[in-house]
Image (cartoon, rainbow, N blue to C red):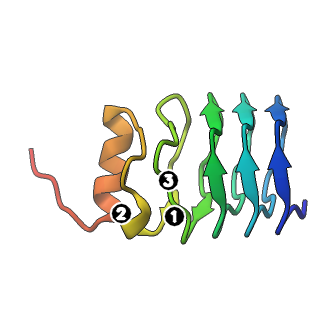
Amino acid sequence: MEFSQSLMQDILFQLCKGHYCDFGGSTFKDCMFDINDLTGSGFVQCDFKKTSFDKCILNSTEWFNTKLKELDFSSCEIENIAVSSDKLTGVVVNSSQALEFVKLLGIVVKD
């Protein structure tokens, strides 16, 4: 589905199956993503203000040139997520997700 260059304001996305949606260049204000499967979707060059993600599947999504500050992915699945490393500041993740981001930064963790 094509949603690029859109203004999304005061929207609840709930129980949506949105595989491979293109949100590129969109602005999200006061939106909530609740229990959605957005596998393979693109959030490239998006702007998020007061937007939340709860229990979403975000595997293989792309977030290039998108500031992740204040986005909370801690209840979401984020395997194989693609991001711009300079836009990670302030993103909220759980401890196992933090390992995914460590890999993205090219850091090797030894036990």
Residue 22 in percent (x, y) is at 79, 64
State yes or no: discs 2 and 1 in contact (Cβ < 8 Å): yes
Which residue is tagged 1? 82
Distance (Cα) linking label 2 and label 3: 14 Å
Q: Compared with residue 58, is residue 52 higher up or lower down, i.e. above or below?
A: above
Q: Amino acid at mark 1?
A: Ala
Q: Quadrant of residue 53?
A: top right
**Label 2: element kind:** helix
Q: Earlier in the sequence, mark 1 or mark 3?
A: 3
Instruction: Decide which of 109, 63 is in the foreground and name it.
Output: 63
Mark before the other along the chain sequence, 2 or 3? 3
Which element type, helix, strand or loop, lies under badge 1?
A: strand
Residue 4 in the figure: left or right of residue 47: right
Mark 1 Cα-neighbour bin, 10 Å: few <14, some 14–19, many ≥20: some
Q: Earlier in the sequence, mark 2 or mark 1?
A: 1
15 relative to 71, above or below: above
Q: Which residue is mark 2?
A: 104
| Other-residue count near label 2 (Cα within 10 Å), few / some / many at <14 / 14–19 / ≥20 | some
Q: What numbered label is drawn on residue 95?
A: none
**In front: label 1 or label 3:** 3
> Which one is in front, 14 or 86?
86
Could you tell me residue 90's position as x and y percent? Answer: 38, 47
In the image, what residue occupies the spot 82% across and 36% down? 10
Q: Are marks 1 and 3 in contact (CB under 8 Å)?
A: no
- For label 3, the residue is 68
Q: Amino acid at mark 3?
A: Leu
> How much space separates mark 2 and mark 1, taking CA atoms?
8 Å
